[in-house]
Amino acid sequence: MSKAKTTKAPAPVAAKTKQSAVATFDVTGFDKATLLDWYKTQQLGRRLDEKAALYLKMAKGWSYHAPFAGHDGIQLALGKIFRPGKDYLFPYYRDMLTSLAAGVTVEEIIANGLSKDADVAGGGRHMSNHFAKISIGLQNSSSCTGNHSQQAVGTGRSIRKYAGDEVVYCSTGDSTTSEGYYYEAVNGADREKLPVIFVIQNNKYGISVPLKDQTSNETVSDNFKGFPNLKVIECDGRDPMASYRALEEARAYVLTGKGPAMVHADCDRIGSHSNSDNHELYRPAADFEAMKGRDPLPRMRATLIANGIATDEELLAIEEANKQAIFAAADVVEALPDPAGSSYIEFLVPPSVVDYSDNSESRYVNDPSAPQLTFREGINTALIEEFRRNPNTFLFGQDVASHKKQGIFNVCKGLLDEFGNDRVWNAPIAEDFIVGTANGMCRYRKDIRVVVEGAEFADYFWPAMEQLIECTHDYWRTRGQFAPNMVVRLASGGYIQGGLYHSQNLEGTFTTLPGLRVVIPAFADDAIGLMRNAIRSEGITMYLEPKFLYNYRPTSASMPADDFIIPFGKAKIRRAGSDITVVSYGTAVHWSLQAAERLAAEGISVEVIDLRSLAPWDKDMVLESVRRTGRCVVAHEDKKTAGFGGEIASTITEELFRYLDAPVVRVGSKDTPVGFAKSLEAAILLNVDDVIGAIRSTARF
């Protein structure tokens, strides 16, 4: 196996001039107009950096500010090599100069810093100093250090699949490389040979943590030199020209299709990590003295004078024009309105293809004489249908595309055979990578739909929570400019003697995340109707599949018509009753129906509601039913404590207290891990007798 390709950019020229004792840069190959434009941008960025600090002192805004001084070279070059409207650039929170050079205006920089409604990144919804302009390809990245590396790789994957000639730039600091998901991103880009350039701005500190406490290699790109398709390039990140040459070399390489590139830029962090950090508390005095002579701005200025590009007077004129531009922009932006507090509710969840008023379900009647689909077959059928309907639909995950296996529960059976490995493929066992790259794939075009098997069992999904949380607020954070159009499938729950890591229910966690849809069908027809809505709608849906039901015959139903789509948040009455309401979902719906059948012999009339969707959930139907019956039991397979049933019970108590003839009762599995032995599993998980006991006691209260 060949090792990663490594080149070093030419060392910066260290000439002395009569005008200055500052070491200059090598400007060979750069014309006068370019150099003057670059200086104008660099100097303007540094003055904006100072303006940000001034706003802080004046308590006018920019409450988070991470200065870029000392990173000037790589940031200027990165912004200039980026092609607005074509390439994709994922910046990090220190990338002010990158953003300015890429096409974010002075007004837009200040509007972001002051969290104004006019902020193009997201109207003040995201932290200041997190610059974005999605209209030109500058992505809105999170505060979670370097998690955009996963999304960058996903975007690169879409470029490769659609044979595009765009380039993805992923910019981070050195400390990001300590994150496991960054390694996953580089590994994925290398394995898939994607057009992604990882830019590491190495300033030797992660807030107060020095590089030696982060990694054994001072040049952190050395940690990645074992990847066979990755081209590693080192440069002086203070020098704009050297940085640009390095990025040009990287771009030329990734456009060959041979693999990704990594540009390691050696930088200085001249200021503190941010306004809330005092670097004098942990940095040696020698650091500050050494950085003075390496400051990129005076070196760029001296370079232009030494090479006859501009006179001191000409540069003073540029600097004065920049100052006036900032003053003028500040006057305009400071007068702009802040976002309305009441607007927080907007852009929480993208619109779905059908809403609550849709009644296509009422036209469907299960035909027992027609071929019956099991729950598993319903999901499989829906997936195949949607893949035929939209050729921009993709599926990947663990074990979904092996030649004959195609999913450990056979839910994905046949998709690889019909749609091929270009649309259905195996992912590495890296759950965060699966979800993060799915997010990135959606950024390439709006009609892309990505279905992922987030983990083989729901229990193994926890590593992906970092990226899932990112997905939940993408739409809100960008004020509707981007939504990850994803369906995350998870085989959930127990009753298969799976024990630990094969029996968990995660919906109690998922429903706490604003911006996330959560659905749990319990019948084959619902599985089809909800999958159609989930794939066709914008935004992210957690599609939880109770694995016990896959081949459970009572879930079977006939194939619904093509227009059968179940709205999110619309429950269904599975059995009408008058004495007590049971609210349930998933496997527990079937236990509740069995309980209701047995209790009918005792004269207890039980109404069973199948929620089907938890986020949103059908409050109207539940409240209407409980208002009639006066009693309610909430049954679910998840643990009783902190399960979603608590939310339902609380809502009923808050809104219907005067109508209740008994306390609302929750019944679920025991508050313990699920044991492997059959006897332990049977004692721990919710069963029909548990539901019967809860109904009896509530009915007789």
Image (tube, helix red, strand yellow):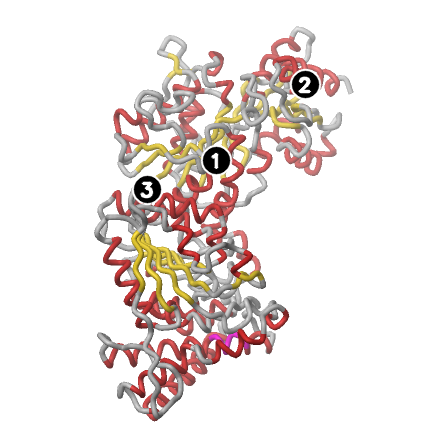
Nearer the observer: mark 3 or 1; the answer is 3
Q: What residue span does the magenta drawing correspond to?
A: 49-53
In this rendered view, identify the residue nearer to me: 662 or 676: 676
Q: Residue furthest top?
A: 601
Q: Position of residue 552 (x, y in %)?
A: 48, 14
Residue 165 drawn above or below residue 100: above
In this rendered view, identify the residue nearer to me: 318 or 512: 318
Residue, x 31% and y 84% (percent of image)?
A: 304
Check disc 2: other Cα within 10 Å, few if <14, some if 14-19, many if 20+: some
Q: Position of residue 55 (x, y in %)?
A: 55, 76
Tag of residue 139:
none
Residue, x 69% and y 8% (percent of image)?
A: 602
Task: Identify the amino acid type marked 1.
Answer: Met
Residue annotated with mark 1: 542
Using the numbered discs, state the Cα–Cα distance from disc 3 to disc 2 in whole angstroms: 60 Å
- Secondary structure of the residue carrying numbered label 2: loop
- Left or right position of 300 against 677: left
Tag of residue 191:
3
N-terminal of the two: label 2 or label 1?
Answer: 1
Quarter-of-image position of residue 379:
top left
Residue 309 drawn above or below residue 141: below
Q: Quadrant of the C terminus?
A: top right
In this rendered view, identify the residue nearer to me: 693 or 293: 293
Nearer the observer: mark 2 or 1; the answer is 1
